Image: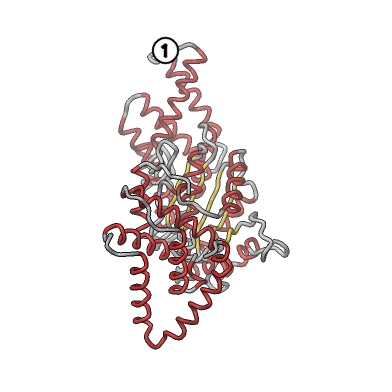
Amino acid sequence: MKSLKIPKRLTTALVNSLTAGVVPRVGLEHIAVGRKPEVESILRDMDNIAEGGAAFRLITGRYGSGKSFLLQMIRNYAMDRDFVVADADLSPERRLVGTKGQGLATYRELMTHLSTKTRPDGGALEAILQKWIAAIQQDLMLEFGLKPDDPAITQKVEVQIYAVANEMQNLVHGFDFAKVLAAYWNGYKLTDDDLKGASLRWLRGEYTTKTEARKELGVSVIIDDDNWYDYMKLWSEFIAKIGYKGLLLFIDEGVNLYKITNSISRHSNYEKLLTMFNDTMQGKAEHLGIYMGGTPQFVEDERRGLFSYEALRSRLIDGRYGGGLLKTYTSPILKLEMLSNEEILILLQKLREIHAMHFQYEAQLSNEQLIAFMQAAVGRLGAEQLLTTREVIRDFMDLLHTMHQHPETTFEELLSDRAQESENRTGSGSVSVSSKEERASDDLDDFLAEFDL
């Protein structure tokens, strides 16, 4: 396997995250395997978004199947391609709409995590505005041969900023959005931190009353539960106007909408989701991509899932010809399948090398031992679960940690000990476990034969 060279900062993030069973925020390209058709499909979305289009995708798969990983990887790809991105996990406190401000809470979370290539960890709102103003200043100095302290600069910058703001006024809520952008410019120009701060608070959705916003900024509306998505559409157009390719929203844990017990509240959230779907599919939104992760149950359950809402079901259900084995990857739903045995082996190889690099030792485990670990995992978890749970990766990282910290132990001893513990726990159920192991072993026969093992 080709020797890897990864900065210590990234190996630290990878080792710590994977050991804890969470998706790393950085370095994903070093452990990515498979998912080529899904990634290519989303990259085509991004090309369309950059040209002024929009996209909506539901990424589904069982817990641990790689939904969050794929969303995070696409997020990183997008930033590298000069998109602005924002991500949020839904929860009981964060929904698409709610009677207690849950929709606004989602908007605030997205704005907190607003990120760019130069600000990948969030908090990029003010940096985006400052970059916009600085770019206008730079262009004017080059065009007119002006110096930075020339008074004419301020006047010409103001003309450019109001030109962009005026274009926004034709959109829903665009007038107030433009007014706040102008207020930020005035605060920037006059070094008025209070005015700049008030503008940023409004843009982040932090005003709770219209009276306060009117007093401090002269605007008559605030971002709230009902209109927050309209402002996301404004953000996508504004971001494109100032030089970025578009805005991508990554909303994970969609299953929390499925878990809403009140049917009226649940359907209200599905109705908002339908609005987002229609806007992106019908060209009512520009330079905007929305990607939501959720379980198959969240989508397909006809009692409480998205398919319980007929308007969504009719739009999301597979077509007559593109389902089954003939996948097109153009459907609004991207269904993540299990990784193949070959892909899992490649992943384990990468983890082996990254762990050795991070702790500065020579990797010892052979490919034959990696396959033996796969066999043991299949037998323990069941073949149908092996490649769709993060537990396999966590177990492998735990194995690597144990072998590194206890060099007197061998791989075979550890595997044998765990197998014995599993057998002791199953007790009278050993017959069924044994049959599961036999079935799992059969599933790997062809794969092992390819490696002459």
Furthest residue in direction right, as rendered? 321
Residue at the disc numbered 1: 147
**In which quadrant of the rendered view does residue 278 lie?**
bottom right
The secondary structure type at the circle numbered 1 is loop
Furthest residue in direction front, as rendered? 452
- Which residue: 45% across, 73% down? 381
Numbered-mark total? 1
Q: Amino acid at mark 1?
A: Lys
| Direction from residue 10 to residue 248 in the image, left or right | right
Nearest the viewer among 261 and 368 is: 368
Q: Is residue 83 above or below residue 321?
A: above
Q: Is residue 424 above or below residue 445?
A: below
Q: Please indicate, yes or no, whether residue 201 appears anywhere in the rendered image.
A: yes
Nearest the viewer among 321 and 240 is: 321
Q: How is the image coloured?
A: secondary structure
Q: Is residue 213 above or below residue 155?
A: below
Tell me where residue 255 appears, x and y as whole percent: 47, 65
- Which residue: 55% across, 71% down? 443
- Which residue: 73% across, 63% down? 321
Please rate how many residues cluster around mark 1, counting C-alpha atoms within 10 Å: few if below 14, some from 14 to 19, many from 20.
some
Nearest the viewer among 131 and 399 is: 399
Tell me where residue 239 appears, x and y as whole percent: 50, 37
**In which quadrant of the rendered view does residue 191 lie?**
top left
Q: Please indicate, yes or no, whether residue 60 appears anywhere in the rendered image.
A: no
- Which residue: 45% across, 34% down? 179
Nearest the viewer among 225 and 243 is: 243
Tell me where residue 113 appears, x and y as whole percent: 40, 46
Tell me where residue 197 appears, x and y as whole percent: 33, 36
| Direction from residue 411 to residue 142 in the image, left or right | right
